[in-house]
């Protein structure tokens, strides 16, 4: 195996690791929760790490603050406030971590020949996949299957024009909540029913609808993962890594 090629491969692996470390560091510093209240203080939304409300709580005197016909809109208002607070936290995290200069350093390492410059990242701790028991096929066979899998992924992407929407409903459908990946889309509340509810009844309905929406979204995402899993992408990746780790197979 040509030593120059091996050196280039090692450099590429190091650059990829630097980029992965940057992304991991950014993710670890991102705000994981947050909360927000509507302008009148009738409803507070508590965010989960995935950007969807973890819970929705009406104030004990919510009817004095908001009319029952706009309580659903108040939920969206509170959600918007919570997301704005999260974005402010993201901006502060960027300022504190000086990611721009670090990202520029990684970018330079991708463009420069020779050994990549040292970065501010610690060595990656997660081990790579265990390839000891992987017996790869020929490079041509793996490449052909990888191209077929890529075509299938592209077809799946064009089929799904937008992320799936999940709908959750409370008992008797008095509260209906719609979510998608990372976002609350709508909250509909029956005003006639809401007018007779204390915060306890309203909060229970929020909890039921939100749990239903989260459950359905999880099912939709699991189904999408199953479709991807049938492409055997992990197996193809392990075969490719096993070939790259054995210079003799590259020469075949």
Image: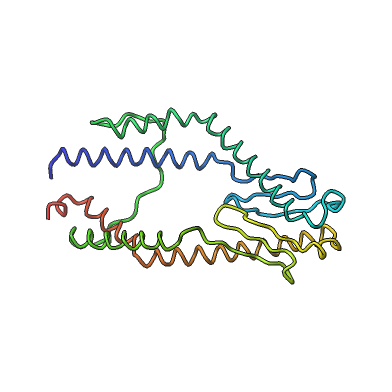
Which of the 4 image quadrants contains residue 88?
Answer: top right
Drawn side of residue 94 relative to residue 199, left or right: left
In this view, the residue in front, 123 or 172, is 172
Drawn side of residue 217 relative to residue 60, left or right: left
Tell me where residue 111 appears, x and y as whole percent.
Answer: 29, 32
- Reply above or below: 243 against 204: above
Q: Residue at x 29, y 60 (%)?
A: 236
Q: How is the image coloured?
A: rainbow
In this view, the residue in front, 69 or 233, is 69
Q: Residue at x 17, y 49 (%)?
A: 247
* Quarter of the image where the C terminus is located: bottom left
Tell me where residue 26 appears, x and y as whole percent.
Answer: 49, 39
Drawn side of residue 123 relative to residue 61, left or right: left
Q: Residue at x 31, y 59 (%)?
A: 150
Q: How many marks?
A: 0
Tell me where residue 195 appears, x and y as whole percent.
Answer: 85, 61
- Reply above or below: 106 against 228: above
* Quarter of the image where the N terminus is located: top left
Tell me where residue 46 appears, x and y as whole percent.
Answer: 68, 49
Which of the 4 image quadrants contains residue 55?
Answer: bottom right
């Amino acid at each position: 195996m040509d030593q120059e090629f091996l050196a280039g491969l090692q450099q590429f692996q190091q650059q990829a690791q630097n980029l992965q470390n940057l992304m991991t560091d950014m993710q670890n510093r991102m705000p994981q929760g947050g909360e927000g209240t509507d302008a009148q203080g009738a409803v507070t939304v508590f965010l989960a790490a995935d950007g969807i409300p973890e819970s929705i709580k009406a104030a004990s005197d919510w009817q004095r603050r908001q009319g029952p016909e706009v309580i659903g809109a108040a939920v969206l208002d509170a959600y918007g406030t919570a997301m704005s607070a999260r974005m402010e936290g993201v901006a502060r995290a960027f300022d504190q971590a000086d990611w721009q200069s670090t990202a520029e350093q990684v970018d330079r390492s991708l463009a420069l020949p020779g050994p990549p410059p040292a970065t501010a990242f610690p060595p990656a701790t997660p081990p790579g996949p265990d390839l000891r028991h992987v017996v790869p096929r020929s490079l041509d066979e793996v490449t052909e299957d990888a191209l077929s899998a890529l075509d299938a992924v592209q077809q799946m992407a064009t089929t799904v024009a937008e992320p799936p929407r999940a709908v959750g409903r409370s008992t008797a459908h008095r509260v209906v909540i719609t979510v998608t990946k990372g976002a609350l889309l709508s909250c509909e509340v029956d005003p006639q029913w809401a007018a007779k509810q204390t915060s306890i009844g309203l909060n229970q309905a929020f909890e039921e609808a939100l749990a239903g929406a989260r459950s359905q979204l999880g099912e939709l995402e699991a189904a999408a993962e199953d479709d991807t899993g049938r492409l055997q992408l992990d197996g193809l990746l392990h075969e490719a890594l096993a070939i790259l780790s054995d210079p003799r197979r590259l020469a075949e």
